[in-house]
Amino acid sequence: MKILVVDDEPEISDLIAEILNAAGHEAVPETDPHEGLARLAAGDIEVMILDVRMPGLEGTELYLESRRMGLNIPTILISGYGPTQDIKEAISEGALCCISKPFKVEKLLELIDAITPGTDSVDRPE
């Protein structure tokens, strides 16, 4: 799967991309959420992993903008903060979930592997 990873901290976006690439996916790291949004125009992104707190455009805003663009891309939010109203709104609009930083690599890979490409559905592990 082609996965867009957007986190304003390059070491995090690069590390997540490296892990996903090693697992057989094609991960595209971005540190600028506006560049991430522009990448969506290509139409080849199948999954997004978005940091919630970023300067200029938060991950939840990026997700909601993708929905306004008519895109239906399965999205995992990541956050170093507790649940907030914007995270709840993004999830109510279709984001799959929000996992807390730091997270276990296995948990992220489990979520990615459960995603059905081309939909916003996921086979949630029991």
Image: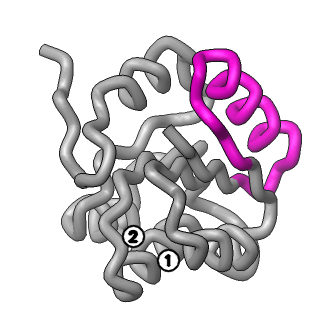
Residue 78 placement (x, y as % from top left): 53, 45
Residue at 59% in and 72% down = 42
Residue 61, disc: 1
- Give amino acid for label 1: Glu
- Looking at the rendered image, the quarter that the C terminus falls into is top left
Q: Earlier in the sequence, mark 1 or mark 2?
A: 1
Q: Is residue 64 visible?
A: yes
Residue at 28% in and 70% down = 89
Residue 51 left/right relative to 63: right
Give residue 86's quadrant in the image.
bottom left
User: Do residues under tags 1 and 2 come within 8 Å of each other at their CB atoms?
Assistant: yes
Q: Residues within 10 Å of mark 2 (few under 14, many from 20)?
A: some
Question: Who is closer to the viewer here, 39 or 64?
Answer: 39
Residue 101 placement (x, y as % from top left): 59, 34
State the SS at label 1. Answer: helix
Which circle, 1 or 2, is nearer the viewer?
1
**Distance Cα–Cα, label 1 vs label 2:** 8 Å
Residue bearing the label numbered 2 = 86
Residue 106 left/right relative to 115: right
Question: Who is closer to the viewer here, 81 or 23?
Answer: 23
Residue 79, disc: none
In this picture, is 84 found above or below 40? above
Residue 13 placement (x, y as % from top left): 75, 43
Q: Is residue 81 visible?
A: no
State the SS at label 2. Answer: helix
| The magenta stretch spans residue 48 | no
Residue 98 placement (x, y as % from top left): 40, 45
Give residue 58's quadrant in the image.
bottom right
